[in-house]
Amino acid sequence: MEKRRIGSSDLFVSNIGLGCMSIGTEEKKALQIIDAALDMGINYLDTADLYDQGLNEEFVGKAIKQKRQDIILATKVGNRFEKGKDGWSWDSSKKYIKSAVKDSLQRLQTDYIDLYQLHGGTIEDNIDETIEAFEELKQEGVIRYYGISSIRPNVIREFVEKSSIISVMMQYSILDRRPEEQMFSFLNEHKVSVVARGPVAKGLLTSRPVEDASQSMKQNGYLDYSFEELDAVISSLKSDIAFNKPLTEIALQYCLFEDTVASVVTGASSIEQIKSNAEAANAKPLTDDEVQKIRELTKASIYAQHR
């Protein structure tokens, strides 16, 4: 599987990563999914301390214990939770980050994290203090690099201009082209990579029929698409672009067309989904003409808030 460099770091990740949030809470099945991903050449695993209140990190730790040196391991911090209690609160303080990383390391059964990501955040946070925490963890050798998970342009700009982040995880797909407006050129200029999430847009860009969408989506649509627009756009993508190719392939290859994208994180709740995603990532890249056609068929939306 093709590998790409994250920013100016020495982390080379498979062009698709496994988003571990969807592997479930049944240990045997979860470990089988992770093992299958690794067997197919995926070396980038993305988890978070919040997922199933740490259980997800525990599963990842068990799965990679004997092959840690071959894995690029990413996790996230910022959502404070109490085991056994519902909900979470936001905490990007230095004290919390430096405490939470110890718990993540223990659950992951490792003494370092390749990419530690802030799991959200707003412009009202004490960003300087957050950066200080990450920089100290780097100096201590506890983390190799850090990044943020955010779609807020104002937050992203602050971190890029003030810190040594190497990546921004953000939602990006054929149906959510908001990052194309400004973010890609800005991040590229600063040698910061995008880790794309949500490439199949809640399952809309898969083989699943549009009619099977949730009642909520039928009523409210997706982002700035009405359900009727979604139906028309997806039909056009299938007939004008995909031909006999799976729509998932078109969706992943569209994200990978951008050099700024280091990896596309795809979720999987079964080995079959892992295989499908791996095949899509290994498929022939889209041509310039195909990408142009996709952009003519879809909306070039922009971020209306947090600018």
Image (cartoon, rainbow, N blue to C red):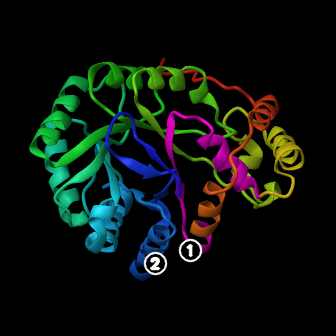
Q: Residue at x 29, y 43 (%)?
A: 78
- Type of the residue with mark 2: Gln
Residue shown at 40% from the left, 30% from the top: 192
Horizontal and vertical percent for residue 100? 19, 50
Q: Disc 2 designates what residue?
A: 32
> Pointer 2: residues within 10 angstroms few (<14), some, or many (20+)?
some
Question: Any magenta on residue 266?
Answer: yes
Horizontal side, residue 159 vs residue 228: left or right: left
**Which residue occupies 41% across, 82% down?**
28
Q: Is residue 63 above or below residue 280?
A: below
Q: Which residue is mark 1?
A: 271
Q: What's drawn in magenta, residue-wise?
A: 246-273
SS at badge 2? helix
Residue 256 visible in rendering: yes
Are the residues at dot 1 and dot 2 in contact (C-beta closer than 8 Å)? yes
The residue positioned 25% from the left and 36% from the top of the image is: 92
- Graded by Cα atoms within 10 Å as few (under 14), some (14 to 19) or many (20 or more), the crowding at tag 1 reads some
Q: Please, what is the three-letter code of the amino acid marked with disc 1?
A: Ile
**Which residue occupies the extreme bottom position in the image?**
28
Decide which of tag 1 and tag 2 comes sooner along the chain: 2
Is residue 14 positioned above or below 170 on the image? below
Q: CA distance from mark 1 to mark 2?
A: 8 Å
Q: Which mark is residue 306?
A: none
